[in-house]
Image (tube, rainbow, N blue to C red):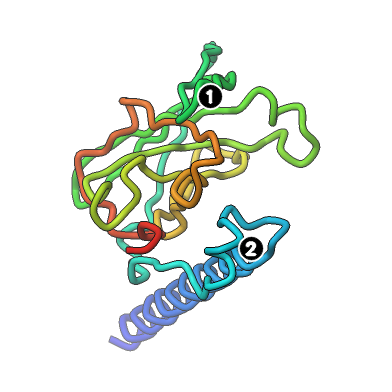
């Protein structure tokens, strides 16, 4: 009986620590994003919008949208020109595929690598995941949202949809943003991450 109590105590403390770190990490992320949007050198906002900007709006933090995924790296990545909101066609490669479970259902997301960024210092291992879901056009930006991460050392990747962000096109039409490929349209509501600008 004593061993069971000790075990449950350890599980409780571990779960509490994970929850605290989750909130701490995401609050730090949100603070960082808000600071960037206030900075005239980094902000995608128009000067007029930036003058009145106070904070981005986010869904309430939700650990259900912190998921463990398996990354299958594409052994023969294909180069292609990704459509954007303008006539710009940046070259990407099909880096791999993320597989994960959410609400007891299986989903996949394609992972891409920008060929120009691959040769840019600090972004050699940068991976890009544009996605759409059933909140788009209502609570979230109609063109979908983005996730990114660095190349992992193993095939395990933690996807935190609480850090899903809008393309800059959500804030100004002076930007050219990659469109979400059909393969990355999720038939579910991802109620996590940033909300639509002016929601």
Q: Is residue 32 left or right of residue 60?
A: right
Counting residues from the start of the chain, the first of labels 1 and 2 encountered is 2
Name the residue rendered at 49%, 42% in the picture. 173
Front-most of residues 85 and 91: 85
Vertical arrangement, residue 113 with respect to residue 18, above or below:
above
Q: Tell me residue 104's x, y (percent).
A: 19, 48
> How busy is the neighbourhood of tag 2: few (under 14 within 10 Å), some, or many (20 plus)?
some
Name the residue rendered at 51%, 21% in the picture. 87
Figure disc tally: 2
Q: Label 1: which residue?
A: 95
1 or 2: mark nearer the eye: 2
Asked if residue 98 shows in the view, the reply is: yes
Residue 73's tag is none
Vertical arrangement, residue 171 with respect to residue 62, above or below:
above
Q: Tell me residue 15's x, y (percent).
A: 40, 74
Specify the quadrant that holds the N terminus.
Answer: bottom left
Q: Label 2: which residue?
A: 36
Q: Is residue 166 left or right of residue 139?
A: right
The residue furthest front is: 48
Q: Is residue 130 left or right of residue 126?
A: left
């Amino acid at each position: 009986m004593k061993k069971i109590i000790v075990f449950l105590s350890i599980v409780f403390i571990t779960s509490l620590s994970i929850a605290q770190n989750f909130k701490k990490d995401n609050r730090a992320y949100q603070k960082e994003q808000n600071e960037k949007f206030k900075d005239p050198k980094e902000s995608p906002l128009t000067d007029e919008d930036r003058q009145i900007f106070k904070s981005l709006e986010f869904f309430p933090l939700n650990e259900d949208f912190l998921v463990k995924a398996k990354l299958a790296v594409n052994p023969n990545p294909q180069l292609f020109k990704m459509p954007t909101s303008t006539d710009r066609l940046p070259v990407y490669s099909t880096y791999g595929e993320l597989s994960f479970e959410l609400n007891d259902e299986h989903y996949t997301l394609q992972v891409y690598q920008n060929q120009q960024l691959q040769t840019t210092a600090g972004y050699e291992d940068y991976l890009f995941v544009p996605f759409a879901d059933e909140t788009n056009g209502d609570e979230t930006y109609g063109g979908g949202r983005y996730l990114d991460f660095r190349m992992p050392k193993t095939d395990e990747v933690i996807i935190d949809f609480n850090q899903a962000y809008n393309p800059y096109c959500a804030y100004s039409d002076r930007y050219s943003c990659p469109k979400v490929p059909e393969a990355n349209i999720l038939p579910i509501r991802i109620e996590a991450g940033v909300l639509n600008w002016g929601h």
